[in-house]
Amino acid sequence: MGGVWNCTENNCTAECTVMGDAHVTTFDGRIFMHMGSCQYVLVKSRGSTKFTVTLQYSACGESQEHSCIHSVALVVDEDVSRQLTLTREGEIVIGASMAVNLPYSDDMVKVRRLTSMFVGLRSVFGLRFQYDCQGGRIYLQLDSTWMGSTIGLCGTLNGNLRDDFLSPAGMIEGTPQLHVNAWKVSSACLSPVNIPVIDPCEMNQQNVFYAAQCDVLMEEVFAPCHAYVSPSMYHQQCRYQACRCGSACLCTALSHYAYICNKHHVTINFRAHVSECGMVCLGGMMYHPCTSTCGRTCQSISSGEECDGDCAEGCSCTEGTFYDHARQRCVLLSQCHCYFMGSVFQPGEVSFSSSGP
């Protein structure tokens, strides 16, 4: 009674996720399994600014029985000479072969290492994503200006789940696998059409122990989040992932639910409670569920890096210290090496350039 409406015009973002290389959630919330080993269009624009994000899959696992994300690539305005590729090994490549160091920026994008686990990309046209190279996780966000202007595996971003499987030909595919195959970059890459979904727990009995650890999602550790996000679906995904590839995939699945919880302002530090997922931070860094290395490295001090508030799970230096790549550890500001024009200088060293010292 007596309340007053406070109207705002926030630019809300939509998110498409890929978890553990296999589980895709579209912008509109449709969830499906991805099984294939080709290159696929994750999202493609239909607006005046043209961009395409692709995923390259390749065989992985001890006996090459699984498919994992090998790289993520962004092409803007169909200029493949400036294609930006992030690899599973954490490298960034421009064009066909030019490897560059992070942080990297040009007139369209900025890319930097957010934490020990995630690389972050932010564009000038409303696209940004975080990529967990080793865990096969991608969190891709688009501004609301792209509403109704996307196609690809991530769907149509129009609030309608029923047309998320729209193909390049304008047809709505009937199954997830047909949808995935429709968005192959090259038709020469062969993908089976009717792949039976087999419970990996039946195939990999040695990993059933790790699948049992997924029960922590239903227990006290994650309980503060249950009122915001039901853990049931994430528990199913976790069991699939854990049986597929053991402890590493178990921890990725638990991290994914913790990430979703963090979007609801519920911080879950599950790694302190699940021994298989304990994280060792090297070089004096500390683990945090939501942190950032922006402005916290000696390189960023040298370059005057601008920070945007993005955070991700992983290791970073504690307050008052900075990560020095030359020493591979956290140091005080006075101990930082200086990074300039591709060269590394000792702390306190004076170098002369054409413009002076």
Image: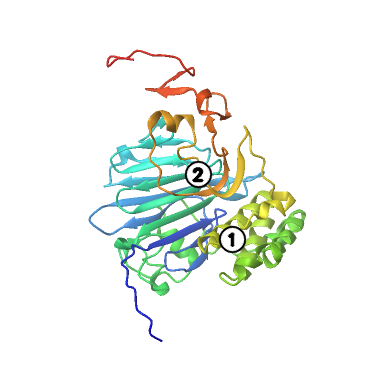
Q: Position of residue 235 (x, y in %)?
A: 65, 65
Count of numbered circles on the image: 2
- Residue 186 visible in this rendered orientation of the protein: no
What residue lies at 37% left-to-right and 42% top-to-bottom?
110
Q: Position of residue 158 (x, y in %)?
A: 35, 70
What residue lies at 57% left-to-right and 24% top-to-bottom?
327
Separation of disc 1 and disc 2 at Cα?
19 Å
Q: Amino acid at mark 2?
A: Ser
Under tag 2, what secondary structure?
loop
Which is nearer the eye, 11 or 141? Answer: 11
- The residue under label 1 is 257
Q: What crowding class fits label 1: few (fewer than 14 Cα within 10 Å), some (14-19), or many (20 or more)?
A: many
Q: Amino acid at mark 1?
A: Tyr
Nearest to N terminus: mark 1 or mark 2: 1
Q: Is residue 1 above or below residue 331?
A: below
Under tag 1, what secondary structure?
helix
**The C terminus sits in image quarter:** top left
Hey, which quadrant is residue 153 in on the image? bottom left
- The residue under label 2 is 292
Hey, which quadrant is residue 181 in on the image? bottom left
Which is nearer the eye, 97 or 347? Answer: 347
